[in-house]
Amino acid sequence: MGEEPAEKGAPLPPPRGRRGRALLLGGVIFLCGCVCGASAMTLFAARRLESFRQHGLNTEHAFSRLRRALELDEAQSAEVREILKRGIADLREVRRRVGPEVQDTLSRIREEVSAVLDERQRNLWNTRFDTLRERWFPPMEPR
């Protein structure tokens, strides 16, 4: 009938040239997965940060996570909740007090650097500085 190999059960060698392509394709797929994962994580983190900037700290959400993580009983929960409320209120008050000083210092830095630059550099500096200032030092909203 058909011809049988000389040795039965001996594995056949893999076809030449396919191993390299398979490794390359595997590497490309891995890198694409890394890029997709990093992009998704960046979007997630940026949205969480923006939400935090707009709405501030959600004390109830933070407290419920802390209560579960520390396995607090009812008495501890009530005490910790009050401590966190007072502490966060104190932090907001400190931020309200020093906020104008921070904004004044930022304005001074912006103007002093602008004075050293030519017109093109000044426009670029002011644009970049204002963008970073909005992102990292947003004005305090009244609560």
Image (cartoon, helix red, strand yellow):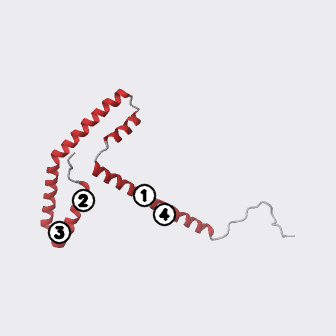
Q: How far apart are marks 1 and 2 (CA)?
A: 23 Å
* Position of residue 83 measured from the top left corner of the image (x, y, whole percent): 27, 33
* Position of residue 20 measured from the top left corner of the image (x, y, whole percent): 59, 68
Q: How far apart are marks 1 and 3 (CA)?
A: 35 Å
* Position of residue 28 measured from the top left corner of the image (x, y, whole percent): 51, 65
Labels 1 & 3 near each other (Cβ < 8 A): no
Report whether 17 appears left or right of 32: right
Q: Single out the residue that lies furthest toward the front.
A: 143
- Disc assigned to residue 97: none
Q: Single out the residue that lies furthest toward the top.
A: 75
Q: How far apart are marks 3 and 2 (CA)?
A: 15 Å
Which of the marked residues, 1 or 2, is nearer the chain's N terminus? 1
Q: Distance between the residues labelled 2 and 4?
A: 30 Å
Report whether 22 appears left or right of 49: right
Labels 2 & 4 near each other (Cβ < 8 A): no
- Disc assigned to residue 122: 3
* Position of residue 6 measured from the top left corner of the image (x, y, whole percent): 82, 66
Secondary structure category for the residue under label 3: helix
Secondary structure category for the residue under label 2: helix
Q: How crowded is mark 1: few (under 14 residues within 10 Å), some or many (20 or more)?
A: few
Secondary structure category for the residue under label 1: helix
Amino acid bearing label 3: Arg
